[in-house]
Image (cartoon, rainbow, N blue to C red):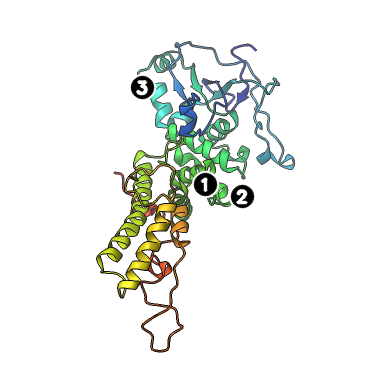
């Protein structure tokens, strides 16, 4: 392909060619992948390429458009496009410098901030800049939004695609350009909130953080903290470190609280501050000790970050402890089981919350 011939024309009079290299690089990979040698690449980004001035591409002055009858919102290539094989990882996109600079401080810095590319642009009024790693579909969505071409932007995105769009907009600092579409996209999401810690749950955390969605953010952070078996990581998403830190802190505090309650209850039964009489204390102490031992919870060695342990499993395990039964020998009528408040694990551990409370988006202040 001729180097000056764009694959996509966002603005036929555009002075800038963005060269997207290594398109569709792996996205949102778990930390565990890095431990097995699969290092997740950094999100797509701008790279300084040799400043090479190019002449504006020779194309028709009119941009091809799709008629309304052909449902343009489902067509990712509504602008003029040169027919090429779809399997490729390098794309040339013609765009307007004015639109890029108006909506994106990052693009403005590229084109006017003293870099080689910006010097060439200011001297020759046309330039080629490079981006890496972004998926072509989501990159086009952001570029079309920067040019105000909302007609060509799909109204429904998958969670995966929305997360990718958000990462690009975060990098180029152009969130405001997506404001018109935010409610449309989030209201049309079909993926349900995950009920366990997974890649999708972290995509939800990222999307709800970036688009400032308090309810999804609270629910998904609760799921992540309650169900993660190890330290929570960002999966390569640009979730602020303070958010990840707060989630890990809340998870560790919740697990530590359950373990502390177990050991404090056991010590209270041994010391006599729990249990109504000797028989009650002895029986409950023995039953609790046996079940803590069989569940690997008796040792005090467990410490943050509590690897291979999640809050929901721990709570469920504790509440499944079998409470012993024995006849109330002090009853004047006899034949009745002993039923004081300390004779049931269900009552001893009744205050354990079902899940860790999610983070309140509105109360987070990282300024």
Camera-nearest label, 2 or 1: 2
Q: Marks 2/1: CA distance?
A: 15 Å
Residue under circle 1? 182
Label 2 sits on residue:
190
Circle nearer the N terminus (2, 1): 1
Q: How many numbered callouts? A: 3
Q: CA distance from mark 3 to mark 1?
A: 30 Å
Image quadrant where residue 4 sits: top right
Q: How busy is the neighbourhood of tag 3: few (under 14 within 10 Å), some, or many (20 plus)? A: few
Kindly check if marks 3 and 2 are in contact, taking CB atoms under 8 A apart as contact: no
Q: Residue at left 59%, top 48%?
A: 191
Q: Residue at x 39, y 72 (%)?
A: 343
In the rendered image, the vertical position of residue 138 relative to residue 348, given as above or below? above
Q: Quadrant of residue 285?
A: bottom left
- Which element type, helix, strand or loop, lies under badge 1? helix
Image quadrant holding the N terminus, namely top right
Q: Is residue 322 above or below residue 200?
A: below
Q: Earlier in the sequence, mark 3 or mark 2?
A: 3
Q: Nearer the viewer, residue 173 or 312?
A: 312
The quarter in which the C terminus is drawn is top left
Instruction: Please determine whether, in this image, residue 181 is positioned above or below residue 34.
Output: below
Q: Earlier in the sequence, mark 3 or mark 1?
A: 3
What residue does disc 3 label? 113
Number of residues whose C-alpha sits closer than 10 Å to that of mark 1, classed few (under 14), some (14–19) or many (20 or more): some
């Amino acid at each position: 392909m001729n180097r000056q011939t764009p694959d996509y024309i966002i603005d036929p009079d555009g002075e800038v060619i963005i060269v997207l290299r290594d398109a569709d690089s792996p996205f949102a990979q778990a930390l565990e992948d890095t431990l097995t040698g699969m290092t997740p690449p950094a999100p797509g980004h701008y790279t300084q390429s040799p400043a090479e001035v190019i002449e504006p591409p020779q194309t028709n002055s009119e941009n091809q458009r799709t008629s309304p009858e052909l449902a343009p919102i489902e067509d990712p290539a509504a602008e003029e496009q040169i027919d090429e094989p779809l399997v490729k990882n390098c794309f040339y996109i013609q765009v307007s410098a004015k639109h890029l600079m108006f909506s994106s401080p990052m693009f403005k810095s590229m084109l006017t901030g003293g870099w080689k590319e910006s010097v060439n642009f200011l001297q020759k009024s046309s330039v080629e800049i490079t981006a890496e790693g972004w998926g072509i579909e989501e990159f086009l969505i952001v570029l079309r939004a920067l040019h105000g071409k909302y007609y060509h932007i799909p109204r429904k995105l998958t969670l995966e695609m929305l997360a990718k769009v958000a990462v690009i907009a975060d990098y180029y600092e152009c969130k405001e350009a997506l404001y018109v579409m935010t409610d449309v996209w989030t209201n049309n999401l079909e993926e349900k909130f995950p009920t366990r810690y997974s890649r999708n749950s972290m995509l939800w955390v990222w999307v709800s953080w970036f688009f400032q969605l308090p309810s999804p953010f609270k629910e998904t952070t609760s799921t992540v903290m309650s169900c993660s078996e190890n330290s929570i990581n960002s999966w390569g998403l640009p979730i602020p470190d303070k958010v990840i830190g707060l989630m890990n802190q809340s998870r560790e505090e919740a697990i530590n609280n359950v373990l502390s309650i177990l050991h404090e209850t056991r010590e209270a039964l041994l010391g006599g501050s729990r249990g109504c009489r000797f028989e009650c204390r002895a029986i409950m102490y023995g039953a609790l000790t046996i079940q803590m031992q069989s569940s690997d919870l008796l040792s005090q060695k467990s410490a943050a970050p509590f690897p291979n342990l999640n809050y929901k499993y721990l709570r469920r395990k504790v509440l499944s402890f079998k409470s012993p039964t024995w006849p109330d020998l002090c009853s004047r009528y006899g034949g009745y089981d002993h039923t004081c408040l300390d004779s049931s694990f269900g009552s001893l551990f009744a205050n354990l919350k079902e899940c860790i409370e999610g983070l309140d988006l509105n109360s987070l202040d990282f300024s």
